[in-house]
Amino acid sequence: MKIFLYSSPYQYYADNLIPLAQYFKKQGHQVYGSYRLSIDGEELMMVDDNKISKPDVVILTQTWWYQDAEIAKQCRVPLYIIDHAPPMMRFTQPDGKKSHLYRKENLNQHYISWGQTTIDIMKQVGYNGINKALGSSRVEETLKGIKENKMGHVLFDTSNRMEDKNLVNGFIKFVKQHPDQQFIIQEHSRSPQYFREALSYSNVRLNTHLTETELFEYSDFIFSFPSSAMIIPALQNKRIYGLYDKHFCSEARTYFKKYENCVFNLKEQDAIPNYKRFINSNILYKREEPANERIYKYIMEGK
C-alpha cells in the first residue's frame, strides 16, 4: 500500500506522524512522509523513500492551515487526521469567542484523537464525522526516550490569547522561596513571554536547546494554563502544579477544581497525586499495546 504523510508548521506536529511513518515502512508499505516548519520552508523527510504519485491513504495532523488544508480538500482517497495535541477543555477567549471551533470541520476524514475528552469537545463544537480515540505515538515515543531523572521544575506557559500576566507573581514568589532549586521556562510557540520576568533570578533559565524528551526528564512541572503537555508527567506519576486556579478564565479555574486531586497549586507540597481519572479522560494508553499498532490496524481496516 502507498502511504502519504504530511505536516506543518511545527516540529511537534510532525512528531505525531514520524513514528507512524516508520512503523508503516517496517510493515512493508511504500511510504512518503515530509513536513515543513513554516509555510514555505524546506521540505524535511520523515523516512527515506521516493515520492508517491497516487497514494492509497493520506495522513495529516490538521486540515485548517497552510498546505495541509489544500491537501485535505483535494484528497480523493481515505484521509486520516492524527491529532497534533488534544484540547484539554473549551474556554472563552478575552474577545468572548469560544475555543476550538476550527475542530468542527468535516472533510469526510477519519479523525484519530488521543482520548475521549477530544471526542467530547469536537462534538460540542459541531463535528459530526468519524472520531476514534487511539492514543498518541508521539507521547509514547517521548516516554521511551526518557532515560534520566533530574531534579528541577519546568514551567510551561501558554499562548498570548490566554496567558494571564497576573499569574507571574505567584511563580516568582515560588522561585524566591526555593533558591536552591532549578527552574526552566518552556515557552509556547506563540508565547507573550510574560514569565521572562523571572529570568532575573539566578536559578531560572529559558529553555533554548532542550528537546521535549529532555524536558520531561525533570521532576516537577508547572502550568499557567491546562495543557496537553500535562499528560506525559501524569503518565510518569510526577508532580504537576497549576497556576491557573486564579486565572481570569472561569473555565480554567473550573478545570483546576476538576483535577485538584492531581494538579496542585504551588502551596500544596505533601499531597499524593491520583492521575487515574485525568489519564483515562485525556489519552488511551496501554503499556502492552502501542499506539502505533492500534492506529496501524485501524487504518488498514478502513483503507
Image: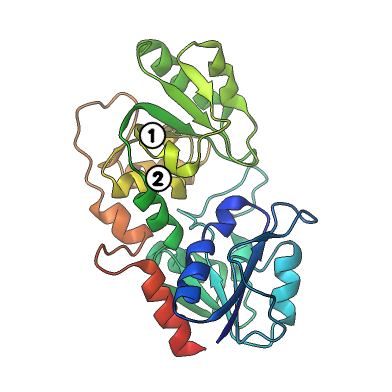
Label disc, if present, on residue 221 of the rendered structure: 1
State which tag comes first along the sequence, 2 or 1: 1
Disc 2 vs disc 1: Cβ atoms closer than 8 Å? yes
Secondary structure beneath label 1: strand
Q: Is 230 situated left or right of 303 in this image?
A: left
- State how far apart marks 2 and 1 are (Cα): 8 Å
Q: How many numbered discs? A: 2
Q: Which residue is mark 2?
A: 230
Which residue: 74% across, 81% down? 74
Which residue: 45% across, 21% down? 170
Label disc, if present, on residue 284 of the rendered structure: none
In the picture, residue 39 is in which quadrant?
bottom right
Of residues 13 and 241, the one drawn nearer to the viewer in this rendering:
13
Q: Residues within 10 Å of mark 1 (few under 14, many from 20)?
A: many
Q: Position of residue 247 (x, y in %)?
A: 49, 34
In the picture, residue 14 is in which quadrant?
bottom right
Q: Position of residue 102 (x, y in %)?
A: 64, 63
Q: Position of residue 9 (x, y in %)?
A: 68, 55
Q: Can residue 51 be seen at all in this image of the molecule? A: yes
Which residue: 72% across, 69% down? 69
